[in-house]
């Protein structure tokens, strides 16, 4: 049997890139001789992250529609045509057995070109509210791997397989002692801990929520791990000066330690974050970002809230209410147990393996 050849396309954010890498790793673990090529958008973070993970990537000159800027969209049709031509050449040259799309700018032209050339298509939809690109490509796909139930409202029911979202291996295999984790952050393992994470780039609203209520944090018995994100660290690090129970960090390298320390977690509602939090199984307060396509983070959050697996605080209300909601939750052990139990029930630890199963079905003679 000749080695499998797989194209994986998409990117733009960690929420697309890390699942894509997890799928590639799971394929290589199952079939080590597989040849994998990534296709991303030039200038986006996948062009750095994918080679760092040990995989080859080719870039397309594609960008998304820029809301509020007509001038920036003038060249968009030309970029789409150019990307389709480039994608056709990449598919012809590489001759893949299957093309896998994980979302992001490059996914559209690559999967469209693959479909035109008769290559089977697998779509991985991470959110509970499908993006425009995946909706358009659904008719051409052989199978659509989703993270949430109920996606038949936007995709053909017979093509849907609920696989979950692949997450980082260190989260799935997390076996960390609380004392060891607390020592890493210089914290007291016996003290209740809130973890605030806004993603690697950060979330201004979450940071403003800490700033607005820092006196309340300073005067309570709780300790806080606060990831500002690299964009906001210099603007907000002064808030923690003299506040000994507030550990401010630009980026948390050891998320397994952070999750182990946390009694309550405050987070944005990106698909990858939620998939990790479902496996962690701690009580969570979600603050959906309003600055995302089609408000998909609110849909993600509500999918959990409807299962009584998380609490949601609106972005517009977070500055004054978020820290208070977290402190109230820490006092309510019954609510914590309910949220934790329901969250764990929604987690899928072997998502990458399930997606590989579907890829192999599509490529079988």
Image (spheres, rainbow, N blue to C red):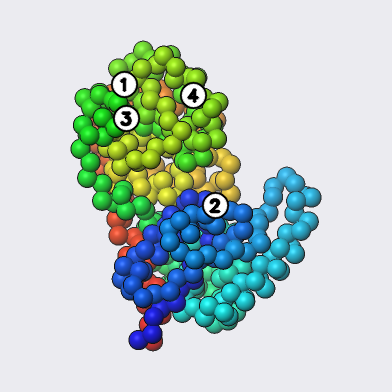
Label 2, residues with CA under 10 Å away: few <14, some 14-19, many ≥20: some
Between the C-alphas of marks 4 and 1, the distance is 19 Å
Between the C-alphas of marks 1 and 3, the distance is 14 Å
Between the C-alphas of marks 1 and 2, the distance is 36 Å
Q: Report the residue marked by disc 4.
A: 237
Between the C-alphas of marks 3 and 4, the distance is 16 Å
Q: Report the residue marked by disc 3.
A: 185
Between the C-alphas of marks 3 and 2, the distance is 28 Å
Q: Report the residue marked by disc 2.
A: 45
Question: Of tags 1 and 2, which is closer to the observer?
Answer: 2
Q: Which residue is at a point 26% across and 34% down the rendered structure image?
A: 181
Label 1, residues with CA under 10 Å away: few <14, some 14-19, many ≥20: some
Sequence-first disc among 3 and 2: 2
Which quarter of the picture shows residue 59?
Answer: bottom right
Asked if 341 appears above or below 142 in the picture, the reply is: above
127 or 5, nearer to the observer: 5
163 or 32, nearer to the observer: 32
Which numbered circle lies on residue 222? 1
Tell me whether the residue at label 3 lies in contact with that at label 4, contact meaning CB atoms closer than 8 angstroms: no
Q: Quadrant of the N terminus?
A: bottom left
Q: Which residue is at a point 29% across and 32% down the rendered structure image?
A: 184
Circle 4 SS class: helix
Q: Which residue is at a point 46% across and 40% down the rendered structure image?
A: 199
Question: Percent x, y for residue 287?
Answer: 47, 36
């Amino acid at each position: 049997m000749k080695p499998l050849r797989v194209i994986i396309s998409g990117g733009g954010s960690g929420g697309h890139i890390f699942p894509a890498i997890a799928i590639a790793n799971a394929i290589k673990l199952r079939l080590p001789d597989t040849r994998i090529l990534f296709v991303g958008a030039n200038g986006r973070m996948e062009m750095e992250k994918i080679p760092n993970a040990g995989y080859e990537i080719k870039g397309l000159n594609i960008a998304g529609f820029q809301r509020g800027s007509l001038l920036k969209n003038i060249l968009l049709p030309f970029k789409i045509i150019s990307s389709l031509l480039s994608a056709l050449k990449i598919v012809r040259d590489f001759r893949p057995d299957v093309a896998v799309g994980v979302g992001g700018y490059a996914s559209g032209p690559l999967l469209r070109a693959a479909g035109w050339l008769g290559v089977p298509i697998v779509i991985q939809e991470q959110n509970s509210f499908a993006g425009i690109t995946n909706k358009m490509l659904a008719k051409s796909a052989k199978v659509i791997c989703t993270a949430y139930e109920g996606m038949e409202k936007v995709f053909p029911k017979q093509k849907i397989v609920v696989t979950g979202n692949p997450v980082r291996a260190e989260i799935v295999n997390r076996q960390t002692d609380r004392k060891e984790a607390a020592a890493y952050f210089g914290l007291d393992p016996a003290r209740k801990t809130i973890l605030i994470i806004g993603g690697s780039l950060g979330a201004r609203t979450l940071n403003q929520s800490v700033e607005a209520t820092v006196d309340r944090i300073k005067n309570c018995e709780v300790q806080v791990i606060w990831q500002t994100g690299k964009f906001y660290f210099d603007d907000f690090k002064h808030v923690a000066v003299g506040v000994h129970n507030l550990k401010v960090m630009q980026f948390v390298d050891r998320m397994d330690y952070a999750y182990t320390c946390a009694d309550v977690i405050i987070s944005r509602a990106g698909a990858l974050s939620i998939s990790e939090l479902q496996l962690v199984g701690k009580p969570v307060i979600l603050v959906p970002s309003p600055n995302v396509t089609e408000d998909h983070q609110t849909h993600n959050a509500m999918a959990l809230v409807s299962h009584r697996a998380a609490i949601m605080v609106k972005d517009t209300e977070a500055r004054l209410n978020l820290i208070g909601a977290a402190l109230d939750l820490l006092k309510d052990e019954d609510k914590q147990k309910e949220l934790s139990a329901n969250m764990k029930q929604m987690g899928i630890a072997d998502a990458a393996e399930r997606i590989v199963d579907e890829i192999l079905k599509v490529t079988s003679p």
